[in-house]
Image (cartoon, rainbow, N blue to C red):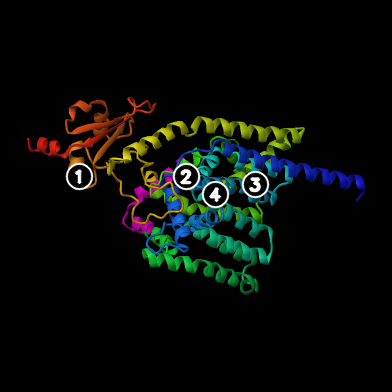
């Protein structure tokens, strides 16, 4: 190899590395650009924050309670212990920052997964598809489990495909950690097992590699499983798999196939929805090209996709209407997309320019879609302020999908460190489902309910919408807050229930 050829190779590799870093830092920059400053965590992210805080406070896993999946908060607790910040909100923002960094790092295994099948330049498109995906960007801002789970799962698959015996053991180790982060990770274990026996069949590698891998996998999982059994009576992993499988078999045996077909319909509907904007251009044609090129490695990808899709399909049957269950499939979608990209390039001149235009096009369409669907953080900050105001006097609200989601955060002290095993959830949120009028709702909920919170949202039950528009009809509701009067853009009203007047009206 002469010096000129070597120079060209080194120069080409340098350009690839620089291009990869540009994609990585651009994706990271967009995540931080949309960072929701001064907003507390909500829902699952708040539960993870509380649990991580408790670990940090006690110095061990809490004995009283645990979330369904505790790998992510255990990981967070380490960073909470080594990074010194001033208050609780800053640690919530740290949780989001860690999530953002992990989400950005996923493009590393995605790139190497693509490199198993394509050259450096085309693989950059796969990395860009994941780095710039608007749903992945939004998910990274929530501070929840997906970034760490997808990073571990994708890395496990890449290591299995690219490396030898030692790599396979490491792949199973990563699969065990992904199972701690999310119980669905156990399906990664099943996938690796299937792929192992296809790759090596029944040979001495079973004893040399597979059996040690199982042992290590279980050694890592057993302490967590034992802890969960002690705390909640369920190992949270294998028992969930058995329970879900049993539920589907029971539905089949009892002729409840309608629910299964509805789940399949929901699965297909959401699968189509998550293809927008970028995967829709590449994946359909990519699937055609993918099946034209059948190799041992592509068979591995098909098996991985099928097995990992099973918990996603079960979520559809359980009517869990959330696209986040599909995000674990995104690295495979990125890979399949490249089969279409390669086919497109084969028909066009100036391939480097075309690749650059594709990546720029992915970025523009992703940002455009995100801007169209993004959360209005100014409105969210107002909702948080309203929750703080309302929580000062109320001890129980009716459920509202947006107005009450920050209530839990109002109970978090500003001072750090803290622990709240007994003081959280003192403000009750009462569900409004199965009620057709306000009177029956208040009568059946009076033990926990003190205030009614309403706005003009059309998704509220009609009897709560009526309170917002015709408050004069309810003499037992005393308006204690009106956002319009207090200078907020978002229109919210809070009413205190006068139970003496309510009871008097009901007697009449």
Say whether residue 64 is left or right of residue 369: left
For marks 2 and 4 on the same chain, the one whose residue lies earlier in the sequence: 2
For marks 2 and 1 on the same chain, the one whose residue lies earlier in the sequence: 2
Q: The magenta stretch spans which residues?
A: 247-269
Are there few (<14), some (14-19), or many (20+) residues within 10 Å of tag 3? few
Kindly report which numbered mark, 2 or 1, lies closer to the viewer in this rendering: 2
Which residue is denoted by mark 2 in the rendering?
Answer: 89
Q: CA distance from mark 2 to mark 4?
A: 21 Å
Work out which quarter of the rendered image holds the C terminus and state it.
top left
Magenta residues, dominant SS class: helix
Is residue 48 one of those drawn in magenta?
Answer: no
Say whether residue 288 is left or right of residue 15: left
Kindly report which numbered mark, 2 or 4, lies closer to the viewer in this rendering: 2
Quadrant hosting residue 281 = top right
For marks 3 and 4 on the same chain, the one whose residue lies earlier in the sequence: 4
Which residue is drawn at the image coordinates 32% and 37% (left, top)? 390
Q: Position of residue 39 (x, y in %)?
A: 46, 39
Which residue is denoted by mark 3 in the rendering?
Answer: 292
Q: CA distance from mark 1 to mark 4?
A: 41 Å
Q: CA distance from mark 3 to mark 4?
A: 32 Å
Residue 437 in view in this figure: no
**Residues under numbered marks 2 and 4 in contact, where contact means CB atoms less than 8 Å apart:** no
Kindly report which numbered mark, 1 or 4, lies closer to the viewer in this rendering: 1
Which residue is denoted by mark 1 in the rendering?
Answer: 446
- Viewer-side residue, 248 vs 26: 26
Which residue is drawn at the image coordinates 85% and 43% (left, top)? 8
Which residue is denoted by mark 4 in the rendering?
Answer: 147
Kindly report which numbered mark, 3 or 1, lies closer to the viewer in this rendering: 1
């Amino acid at each position: 190899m002469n010096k000129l050829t070597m120079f060209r190779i080194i120069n080409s590799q340098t350009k690839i590395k620089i291009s990869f870093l540009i994609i990585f830092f651009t994706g990271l920059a967009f995540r931080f650009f949309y960072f929701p400053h001064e907003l507390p965590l909500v829902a699952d992210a708040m539960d993870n924050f509380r649990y991580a805080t408790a670990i940090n406070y006690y110095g061990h896993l809490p004995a009283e309670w645990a979330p369904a999946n505790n790998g992510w908060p255990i990981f967070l607790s380490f960073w909470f212990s080594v990074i010194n910040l001033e208050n609780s909100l800053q640690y919530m923002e740290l949780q989001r920052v860690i999530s953002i960094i992990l989400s950005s790092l996923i493009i590393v295994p995605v790139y190497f997964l693509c490199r198993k099948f394509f050259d450096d330049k085309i693989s950059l498109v796969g990395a860009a598809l994941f780095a710039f995906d608007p749903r992945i960007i939004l998910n990274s801002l929530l501070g929840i489990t997906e970034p760490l789970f997808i990073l571990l799962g994708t890395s496990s698959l890449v290591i299995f495909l690219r490396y030898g015996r030692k790599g396979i053991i490491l792949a199973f180790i990563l699969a065990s950690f992904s199972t701690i982060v999310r119980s669905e990770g156990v399906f990664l274990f099943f996938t690796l097992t299937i792929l192992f026996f296809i790759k090596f069949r029944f040979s001495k590698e079973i004893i040399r590699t597979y059996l040690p891998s199982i042992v290590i996998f279980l050694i890592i999982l057993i302490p967590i499983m034992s802890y969960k059994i002690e705390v909640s009576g369920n190992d949270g992993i294998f028992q969930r798999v058995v329970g879900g499988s049993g539920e589907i078999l029971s539905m089949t045996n009892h002729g409840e196939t309608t629910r299964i077909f509805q789940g399949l319909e929901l699965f297909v509907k959401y699968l189509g929805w998550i293809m927008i904007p970028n995967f829709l251009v590449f994946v359909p044609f990519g699937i055609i090209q993918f099946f034209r090129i059948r190799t041992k490695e592509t068979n591995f990808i098909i098996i991985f996709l099928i097995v990992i899709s099973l918990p996603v399909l079960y979520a559809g049957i359980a009517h869990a209407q959330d696209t986040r269950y599909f995000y674990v499939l995104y690295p495979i979608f990125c890979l399949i997309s490249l089969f279409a990209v390669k086919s497109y390039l084969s028909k066009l001149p100036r391939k480097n320019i075309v690749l650059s235009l594709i990546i720029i096009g992915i970025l523009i369409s992703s940002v455009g879609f995100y801007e169209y669907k993004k959360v209005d953080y100014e409105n969210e900050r107002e909702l948080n302020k309203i929750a703080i105001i309302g929580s000062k006097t109320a001890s129980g609200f009716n459920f509202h999908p947006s107005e009450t989601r920050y209530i839990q955060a109002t109970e978090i002290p500003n001072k750090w460190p803290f622990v709240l095993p007994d003081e959280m959830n003192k403000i009750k949120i009462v569900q409004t489902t199965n009620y057709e009028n306000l009177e029956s709702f208040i009568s059946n909920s009076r033990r926990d309910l003190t205030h009614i919170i309403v706005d003009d949202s059309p998704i509220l039950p009609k009897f709560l919408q009526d309170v917002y528009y015709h408050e004069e009809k309810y003499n037992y509701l005393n308006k204690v807050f009106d956002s319009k009067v207090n200078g907020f853009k978002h229109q919210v009203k809070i009413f205190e229930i006068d139970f003496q007047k309510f009871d008097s009206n009901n007697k009449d």
